[in-house]
Image (cartoon, rainbow, N blue to C red):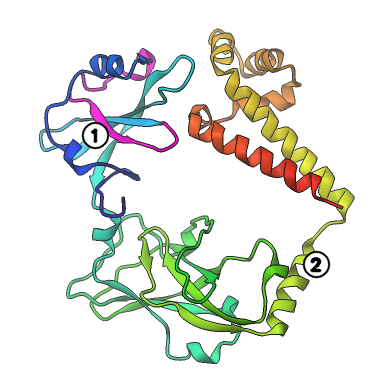
Amino acid sequence: MDTAPRIGDLEVDGDELTGDGTTLSELAEELACGVDETTTAEAPAAGWRVLRRLEGGAVYLGSPVDADHRTWRVAQVHPGELSPVVRVHPDTLDVRPSRAERRQGLVLRWPPFVEEIADPIELVIDIVNAGTTRWTPTDEGFFAVGALTAPGETGFSFGWMGSAAGRAVPLDPGEYARVPVQLQPPSDPTSLRPGPYDLQVVVVELGLRLAEPLRVELTAELVARQVAKRDRHRADPASQRRAFDREIEAEQLQVGAHQSWPEIAEVIGSAVSDDEAMERIAAVLGTTTEQAASVYDASLRAMVRADADRRDEHLQELIRQRDALE
């Protein structure tokens, strides 16, 4: 949904931003859900409509709070839950341009000395304002991620974490910002082979991609360096197994907590202190109060089915990796 308008960070169907909508209770009835009345204070009585349905099953609802439909209240529900309810987000959110609109006029360009850099991990790239007006950031960052693909391939995946160090800056026409390319390390450096690769680059928050990948040549020395780097930070098998066991235990706790959310919500509703709440969670889950603290501190996102599905997949992958240790 790169070309879709956004409410906050959520890409939405632009057609749903017009029209009258309905009441929250009527929309909840259509979705076969209840409404968490504790979250509806100051929420609009009418104007609600479905803004987006995610593949994971979550449904986002919204209602405008102003006459020109520029500011909204948003709610979320997962109809697949045992007792699904609509929960309204406490803050108002503004309609924002799509990522495609925000990056208009910007292009990626390699600096002239790029061919002098042999190691892809040392590369930098220029974000250039090739338009005719000043480009001013809102809340975007200039964080460039690079990934090596086989020659001719264009698809790749990556993980990233924004920071103040990668914040965007205003650019007048012709100006540029030079930023480092954060090359994604291969999950298994031993899978790398000397030879040609395409280096793909994307500025993630804007969806700004390099028009043509950079062809790079990995030497045997560079591949050996990546393997050595992994081996320097690799713990011995026994330590790795203990680390996996700790992470698996933490994920199992969260997976179990998701299955018990209704019971947890019921027992902590009358708790008069944090300590009492954690003791009650521990009793429900059969854990220690220290373990229950991580459940107590979890955000509402942990209640979403998509998050539970992600955790379950991650748990199975952790178990697979642990069992594959020698």
SS category of the residue bearing label 2: helix
Q: Which mark is residue 277?
A: none
The one nearer the camera, 316 or 292, is 316
Residue 114: x, y in percent?
Answer: 49, 87
**Residue drawn at (68%, 23%) of the image:** 292
Q: Quadrant of residue 168?
A: bottom left
Residue 95: x, y in percent?
Answer: 23, 44
The answer to whether 159 appears left or right of 175 in the picture is: right
Tag 1: residue type? Trp
Q: Is residue 266 above or below residue 118?
A: above
**Residue drawn at (19%, 36%) of the image:** 16
Q: Which mark is residue 72?
A: 1
Q: Are marks 2 and 1 in contact (CB under 8 Å)?
A: no
For the magenta stretch, what is the residue range? 36-57
Q: Which mark is residue 232?
A: 2
**Residue drawn at (26%, 21%) of the image:** 42
Q: Residues within 10 Å of mark 1 (few under 14, many from 20)?
A: many
Residue 123: x, y in percent?
Answer: 53, 79
